[in-house]
Amino acid sequence: MTEKIKLYDDSKCTACRGCQLACKQWNALKASQTENRGTYQNPPSLSPNTFLLIHYQDYVDKKGDVKWLFRKEACMHCTDAACVTVCPSGALHYNKDTRTVGLDHEKCIGCKECVAACPFEIPRWDAKTDKVYKCDMCESRITNGMDPACVKACPTGALSWGEKEKILAKAAKRAKYLGGDAATYGDKYCGGTHFMYVLKEKQEIYADIHRNPGVPWSVTLWKGLLKPLSLLAGGGVIGGAFLHYMIHGPKVPHEGTGVEEKKGGE
Amino acid sequence: MKKGYVQVTDSYERILHWMLAISCLLLCVTGLGMMFQTFNFVGAFFGGLKSLKLVHNFTGLVFAVSLALVIRMWWKEAGVFVFPEDLDWCMAAGGYLWHVDKVPETGKYNPGQKAFFLVVAGGGILMILTGLVMWFPTALPVGLVRWMYPLHALGFVAIFAFFFIHLYLGTIGNPGSVDAMITGWMDKSVLTMLHPKWVKEMEHEGKLVVYGEEKKDDAHGHHA
């Protein structure tokens, strides 16, 4: 088993969107008709046919300088993935080798439980197919020793894919090299994500980024406590009824009187 | 029908009871098939998990209609506690847990039955509301939708546990009582033991219908 991580370094990203296109190409996803909204960011958000999106953001820093910030949004492939925890059919699963989160559409029943559970709001439900879609880290490629399509397409080295320890070390080294507010994002959330960032600016500056994401309490309460409790309580009642029948016995009226029969030995 | 049996329910009550019971059981079975991946095999009986999901959702609608009618039908008799008699009955645990010389007499339904009714009514409403949000989760803010799932599971914990209590007390725990929901006629001695005050009330009002005896009054049972 080789646990692997995909790293996105926004200081190297030119927002060429080669990754976005490669993703569409490998996964055979159609383009959506969109309209000009005054930004290069297109399409506007993730969708059932967009698993990967480069965010464009104009940012004015303290000195009054205008900067362009880019961020690649896609499934973060959590180690403790809420979507896998809630998935009723096993469609969402951990890849045995890389520990990334795959999605088997044959098994997806379109219940949308993962849509509400994901702390990064990644899975998107398609009304036409009644199934959910998201990045599966190109499971068909990585299980055959290839890089994910987005990494393969990246011309600047902003994206990389490799063994967990090596990537973690690489990300830490890069953040340190960049200095200032540069930091890693992802490695501390949800047990460590298998897609992580090196961000050149403070996390707070990035629009629409999820701050301090984690497995929702509702998911822990639901799947960790109430789910096992349901069978325990049901089983407890069956056991209790059995004991009641054996020890106390049923209520039986004394022959023809309508008064409960007195039991001996009580 | 045996002589000496008393009519305790009419067909409307029994049909609604079984509509609610069968839809509830089907919901439990199909729900378990989705709640535990170990029980995914249940999906095979419905042509796959996706069909199982659809059966679950639409059975929920049957359950909702049944529950609304059941609440309307039984609310007055089983939804409201009457003091002090219901409290006295509770203090004696209805004679179910330890020996009680004389179980305090209550109305048609004892507080145990009322508690079951209220759990089904309240829990059922919770299941319907949370279930509807779970059916269309993209229509509401995610922060709200997230809490519908544990609430749905909480309702299941309560209803599933209460179901087995109901099953036991309605069959082998109280022999003869199951007739109330099958033929609608119960052995008078069993009925008098379990619901003495109700029998007295019916006798007093001339509403007691005993098989083989001439009717004292046409009015009996439930009026929908």
Image (tube, coloured by chain):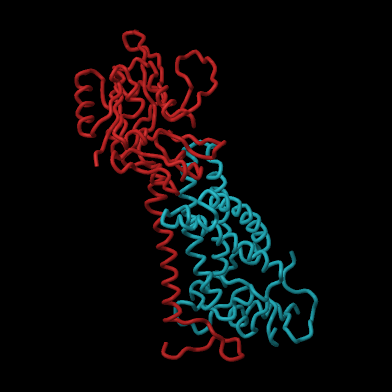
Chain colours: A red, B cyan
Horizontal side of A183 relative to B192 (left or right) equals left
Q: Quadrant of residue A52?
A: top left
Closer to us: A42 or A243: A42
In the rendered image of this protein, does residue B5 appear above or below residue B33? below
The picture places residue A60, in percent across and down from the top left corner, at 37, 12
Horizontal side of A236 relative to B124 (left or right) equals left
Closer to us: B123 or A104: A104
Horizontal side of A6 relative to A57 (left or right) equals left
Which corner quadrant holds the N terminus of chain B?
bottom right
Closer to us: A207 or A259: A207
Q: Is residue A55 visible?
A: yes
Which corner quadrant holds the C terminus of chain B?
bottom right
In the rendered image of this protein, does residue B147 appear above or below residue B70? above
Closer to us: B204 or B224: B224
* Residue at point 22%, 22% (across, down): A174
* Residue at point 56%, 61% (across, down): B118
- The outermost residue toward the front is A144
In the rendered image of this protein, does residue B123 appear above or below residue B185? above
* Residue at point 55%, 44% (across, down): B133
Please count the marks in the image. Answer: 0
* Residue at point 38%, 47% (across, down): A220
Horizontal side of B57 relative to B209 (left or right) equals left
Q: Quadrant of residue A54?
A: top left
The picture places residue A118, in percent across and down from the top left corner, at 41, 38
The picture places residue B147, in percent across and down from the top left corner, at 47, 44
The picture places residue A167, in percent across and down from the top left corner, at 23, 29
